[in-house]
Image (tube, helix red, strand yellow):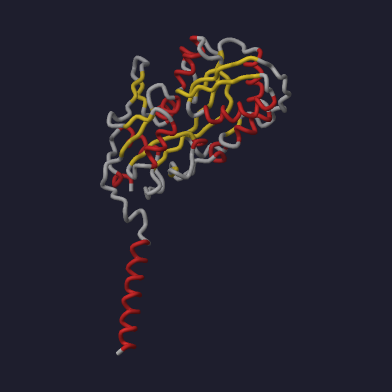
C-alpha cells in the first residue's frame, strides 16, 4: 500500500512537471494577438529622423506645386526624443517605430526590411536602403575652437569613434594633432547625433583641457535654427539640410546612419517590406495580422 502511494505521488509530480514545462515553453508567438491594432509611434515634426524616414519611405507626398505633405497617420503617437521612442516600444507589445541604428539596443527588436538586416555592413554595401547622412553645420567658415573640434571629428581619431556606432565617411582620414584651444562652444540639434557627439566631446576634451563644449539635444530643425539665430555654434542634423538652411549654413557630413524599424521584443514579426512599412505608417495597414 505504501509503495502504491509513493507511485501515485511520483505520477502526480511528473504530471505537474509536464504541465509546468509545457506552459513555460510557450513562444512569444503564442502570446501575441495579431488581430490587435498596430500602435504607430513616430517622431515629432522637426525631427531629422522623421524627415529622413518619411522621405525615404515615400510617406511624404509631393504635390504638383512642389509643396510636400506628411502622410503619417493621425493616429500615430508622437515621441519627441529617441529614448522616449525606445521606452514606448519596449513597453508596448503591439507598437512599431523607428530610430537610428546607432541607438539600437537589446530592449527592442530591429526588423529586417525586405529580408535585409540593418547593419553597418549592409549600409556600406548598399543592401540596406533606409539610410541617411549625419550632418553638422556652421554659419560661415568655422575658426578657433569650433574649427578644431570639427577637425577632430573628421580626423582618423574622430572617425574611429564614429565607426563604433555608425558608418564613418573618411577611411583615409589623418590623425588628429591637438592644438589645445581655449573657449567654449555650443553644439545643438538632433537627438540621434547627440550621443555620438558626447563621446567625441569626451575624447576631445581629454586632449584639449582648456576647451569647453556644451551639447544641447533637441531636433535637427532646432539645431539649424540655433546656428542661424546665433544661439549655438554648431548645429546637428540627422538629414540633408533644407534649401532654406543651405542658403545660410555650411553643412559638413560626418557619418552615415541607418534608420531602423523597431518593435517590441515579444513581437514575432520576421521581416517587413518597405511597402508594408509605408502602409503601416500611413494607416493603410492597421493590424499585425495584415503583415503576418
Provide residue 275's location: percent of width, then percent of height: 37, 37
Quadrant in the rendering for residue 210:
top right
Q: Which is more toward the observer, 121 or 27?
A: 27
Asked whether, in this view, residue 211 is left or right of residue 102, the answer is right
- The residue depicted at 50 percent of the width and 36 percent of the height is 101
Q: Compare residues 163 and 200 and report the one nearer the observer.
A: 200
Residue in view at x 50 percent, y 38 percent: 128
Relative to 30, 170 lies left or right: right
- Give the quadrant of residue 109: top left
Q: Position of residue 186 (x, y in %)?
A: 55, 17
Q: Which residue appears at 34% of the width and 83% of the height?
A: 6
Left or right position of 155 against 106: right
Q: Position of residue 45 (x, y in %)?
A: 38, 23
Quarter of the image where one finds residue 205 = top right
User: How many marks are shown on the rendered structure?
Assistant: 0
- Check the picture and name the quadrant holding the N terminus: bottom left
Residue sitting farthest toward the front: 2
> Residue 84: x, y in percent?
40, 33
Residue 140 position (above or below residue 292): above
- In the rendered image of this protein, does residue 216 appear above or below residue 172? above
Residue at 56% x, 30% y: name it. Answer: 196
Amino acid at each position: 500500500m505504501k509503495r502504491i502511494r509513493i507511485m501515485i505521488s511520483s505520477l502526480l509530480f511528473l504530471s505537474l512537471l509536464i504541465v509546468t514545462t509545457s506552459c513555460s515553453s510557450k513562444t512569444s508567438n503564442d502570446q501575441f494577438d495579431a488581430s490587435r491594432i498596430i500602435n504607430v509611434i513616430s517622431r515629432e515634426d522637426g525631427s531629422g529622423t522623421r524627415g529622413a524616414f518619411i522621405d525615404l519611405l515615400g510617406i511624404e507626398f509631393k504635390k504638383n506645386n512642389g509643396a510636400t505633405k506628411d502622410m503619417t497617420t493621425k493616429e500615430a503617437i508622437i515621441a519627441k526624443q529617441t529614448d522616449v521612442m525606445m521606452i514606448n516600444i519596449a513597453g508596448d507589445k503591439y507598437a512599431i517605430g523607428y530610430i537610428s541604428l546607432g541607438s539600437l539596443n537589446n530592449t527592442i527588436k530591429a526588423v529586417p526590411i525586405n529580408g535585409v538586416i540593418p547593419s553597418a555592413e549592409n549600409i556600406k554595401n548598399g543592401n540596406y536602403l533606409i539610410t541617411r547622412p549625419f550632418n553638422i553645420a556652421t554659419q560661415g567658415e568655422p575658426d578657433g575652437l569650433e574649427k578644431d573640434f570639427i577637425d577632430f571629428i573628421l580626423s582618423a581619431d574622430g572617425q574611429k569613434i564614429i565607426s563604433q556606432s555608425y558608418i564613418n565617411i573618411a577611411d583615409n582620414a589623418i590623425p588628429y594633432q591637438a592644438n589645445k584651444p581655449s573657449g567654449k562652444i555650443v553644439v545643438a540639434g538632433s537627438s540621434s547625433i547627440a550621443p555620438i557627439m558626447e563621446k567625441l566631446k569626451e575624447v576631445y576634451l581629454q586632449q584639449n583641457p582648456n576647451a569647453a563644449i556644451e551639447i544641447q539635444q533637441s531636433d535637427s530643425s532646432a539645431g539649424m535654427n540655433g546656428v542661424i539665430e546665433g544661439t549655438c555654434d554648431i548645429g546637428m542634423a540627422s538629414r540633408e539640410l533644407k534649401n532654406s538652411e543651405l542658403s545660410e549654413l555650411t553643412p559638413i557630413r560626418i557619418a552615415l546612419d541607418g534608420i531602423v524599424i523597431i518593435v517590441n521584443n515579444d513581437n514575432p514579426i520576421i521581416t517587413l517590406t518597405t511597402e508594408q512599412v509605408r502602409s503601416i505608417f500611413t494607416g493603410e495597414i492597421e493590424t499585425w495580422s495584415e503583415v503576418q
